[in-house]
């Protein structure tokens, strides 16, 4: 009957170590875990002291026996993936080789709340307590997990605060124009005793070679093949030159003495994962921060050429074409009817083998797609050579034209435009910092800054385009003065240097030089 129901309370008996009763195990197998976060001399001393302390601490207790000292040296506390000793200790606990763990504090064990609680719950499932010496917490106590959750959260906040302080320090240095670059894999530069970038002459020559060959028409793959053939190593010390490696060198502003800071940013302080900065956090562009390897005008010409190659679209549907550097005429011979480029192909016409150039639309879709003429390679090359000969043979007539064109491309006062933009940018950036520090909305200021930066970039791009045209004219002028009246045969390197575009008509070619000259020749 319910009135006579008897309830007997059976008190909990504390068990440790995989469910084995304490009385069945005269001594507890106790392990200690230590960690220091850096490899400095001071921290290394702390590391050794911790090991000595726990060895002595465990051995003094007659009810304990030492099950091992597990120590991670120089590993961050925010993530446990790389903490090999911690993970090895947990594995031994799960295997029933350890009955109890002692560690200095929660922050030494883990600053990530999730990791900390995950491991403690795993250990509790095996009746293995963790004792935190500093906080005097035993995870097997009734209050242990509640207090532990609070303490672990505080430790995580401490780590987050430290991460934010580091970010603020970096941003302050960025605002002062202090450049920090990892130079270990940075071809062309190293650092002096003050941490400033300085040129490595023999590596700088490799960088110059890459820029020179690219402007001479070589593809990324062709440049890489040449470097590999000469036994030249990359900045990372590798034998293989990937196209992506060369492209990064060609687009790295540090080679002209500038530095774009905060190209990437850390997503969060726990994962430490870095991603490309697409406007999520501020960037800082520092001009003339160190000695350049590549002249600014050469760099801008390379950017212009990269953009041209990346946008090789032609035909009615603007089909994307891959740049080829195998032949000087690749990607510069065009069809006047559909706008497509001409392709070099081996032709077999009724058993007669020859090399011809033909409109890509016609190659892919036949005469119905485009009925542009097919031209023998020898005829095309002879026509281009004839035009070059005409220019060089009549240098006295063409030199005044070049001089006139050079005067026409002298631009407006770029320096005054940039000074005006830079002055306004400086004012806005100071105001932006004030509003950001005061936690005010600075959306409008940011929009105006972005607009001014775009305007500044457009001014620089226009100046670079003018400089590029003027330099190409100067190069042609120098060639005309050096090689006047010297008859020339078709020369691949000369075509690379001089010719911008060739258009194939039924009875003539139109050759457009990089200097802007345009000459027609009958074929």
Image (cartoon, rainbow, N blue to C red):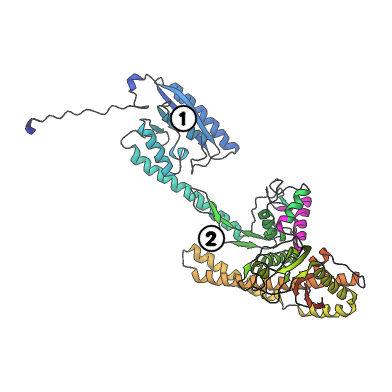
**Mark drawn on residue 57:** none
Mark positioned earlier in the residue sequence (1 or 2): 1
Instruction: Tell me the SS state at disc 1.
Output: strand
Residue on which the image places disc 2: 281
Q: Identify which residue is drawn at 73% across, 66% down.
A: 301
Residue 136 appearing in the image: no
Name above or below for residue 199 compared with residue 499: above
Name above or below for residue 283 compared with residue 518: above
Q: Would residue 462 be counted in the magenta stretch?
A: no
Q: Where in the figure is residue 432, as x and y percent of width and height? A: 53, 67
Q: Nearer the viewer, residue 507 or 245?
A: 507
Q: Relative to 355, is 244 on the left or the right?
A: left
Name above or below for residue 156 compared with residue 343: above
Name above or below for residue 463 compared with residue 213: below
Q: Where in the figure is residue 6, as x and y percent of width and height? A: 12, 29
State which region is magenta: 192-221
- When asked about the image quadrant of residue 457, the answer is bottom right
Q: Identify which residue is drawn at 83% across, 80% down.
A: 401
Q: Nearer the viewer, residue 286 or 366?
A: 366
Q: Relative to 90, is 510 on the left or the right?
A: right
**Mark drawn on residue 32:** 1
Q: Identify which residue is drawn at 58% across, 70% down.
A: 427
Instruction: Tell me the SS state at disc 2.
Output: loop
Q: Which quadrant holds the N terminus?
A: top left
Q: How many marks?
A: 2
Q: Nearer the viewer, residue 84 or 334?
A: 334
Q: Would residue 208 be counted in the magenta stretch?
A: yes
Q: Which quadrant holds the C terminus?
A: bottom right
Residue 433 appearing in the image: yes
């Amino acid at each position: 009957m319910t009135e006579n129901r008897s309830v007997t309370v059976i008190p909990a008996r504390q068990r440790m170590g995989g469910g084995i009763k304490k009385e069945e195990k005269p001594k507890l197998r106790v392990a200690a875990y230590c960690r220091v976060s850096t490899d400095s001399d001071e921290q290394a001393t702390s590391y050794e002291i911790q090991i000595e302390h726990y060895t002595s601490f465990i051995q003094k207790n007659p009810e304990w026996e030492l099950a091992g000292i597990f120590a991670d040296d120089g590993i961050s506390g925010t993530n446990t993936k790389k903490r090999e000793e911690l993970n090895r200790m947990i594995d031994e606990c799960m295997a029933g080789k350890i009955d109890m763990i002692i560690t200095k504090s929660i922050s030494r064990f883990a600053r990530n709340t999730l990791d900390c609680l995950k491991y403690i719950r795993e250990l509790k499932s095996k009746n293995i307590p963790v004792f935190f010496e500093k906080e005097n917490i035993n995870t097997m106590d009734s209050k242990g997990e509640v207090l532990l959750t609070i303490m672990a959260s505080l430790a995580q906040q401490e780590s987050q605060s430290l991460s934010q302080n580091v970010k603020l320090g970096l941003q302050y240095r960025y605002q002062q124009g202090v450049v920090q670059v990892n130079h270990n894999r940075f071809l062309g530069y190293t650092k002096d005793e003050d941490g400033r970038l300085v040129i490595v002459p023999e590596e700088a020559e490799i960088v110059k070679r890459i820029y020179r060959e690219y402007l001479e028409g070589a593809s990324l793959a062709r440049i890489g093949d040449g470097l590999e053939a000469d036994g030249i190593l990359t900045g990372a010390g590798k034998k293989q030159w990937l196209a992506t490696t060369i492209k990064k060198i060609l687009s790295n502003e540090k080679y002209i003495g500038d530095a774009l800071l905060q190209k990437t940013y850390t997503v969060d302080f726990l994962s430490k994962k870095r991603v490309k900065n697409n406007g999520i956090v501020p960037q800082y562009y520092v001009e003339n921060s160190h000695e350049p390897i590549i002249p600014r005008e050469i760099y801008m010409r390379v950017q212009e050429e990269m953009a041209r190659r990346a946008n090789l679209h032609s035909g009615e549907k603007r089909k994307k074409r891959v740049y080829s550097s195998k032949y000087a005429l690749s990607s510069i011979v065009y069809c006047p009817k559909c706008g497509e480029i001409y392709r070099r192909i081996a032709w077999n016409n009724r058993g007669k083998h020859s090399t011809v150039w033909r409109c890509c639309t016609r190659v892919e879709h036949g005469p119905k797609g485009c009925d542009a003429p097919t031209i023998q390679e020898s005829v095309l090359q002879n026509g281009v050579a004839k035009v070059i000969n005409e220019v060089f043979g009549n240098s006295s007539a063409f030199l005044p034209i070049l001089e006139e064109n050079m005067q026409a491309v002298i631009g407006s006062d770029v320096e005054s435009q940039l000074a005006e933009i830079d002055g306004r940018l400086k004012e806005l950036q100071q105001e932006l910092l004030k509003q950001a520090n005061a936690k005010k909305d600075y959306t409008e200021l940011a929009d105006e800054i972005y607009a001014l930066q775009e305007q500044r970039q457009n001014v620089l791009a226009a100046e670079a385009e003018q400089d590029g045209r003027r330099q190409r004219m100067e190069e042609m002028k120098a060639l005309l003065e050096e090689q006047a009246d010297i008859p020339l045969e078709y020369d691949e390197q000369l075509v690379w240097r001089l010719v911008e575009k060739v258009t194939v008509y039924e009875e003539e070619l139109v050759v457009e030089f990089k200097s802007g000259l345009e000459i027609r020749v009958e074929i």
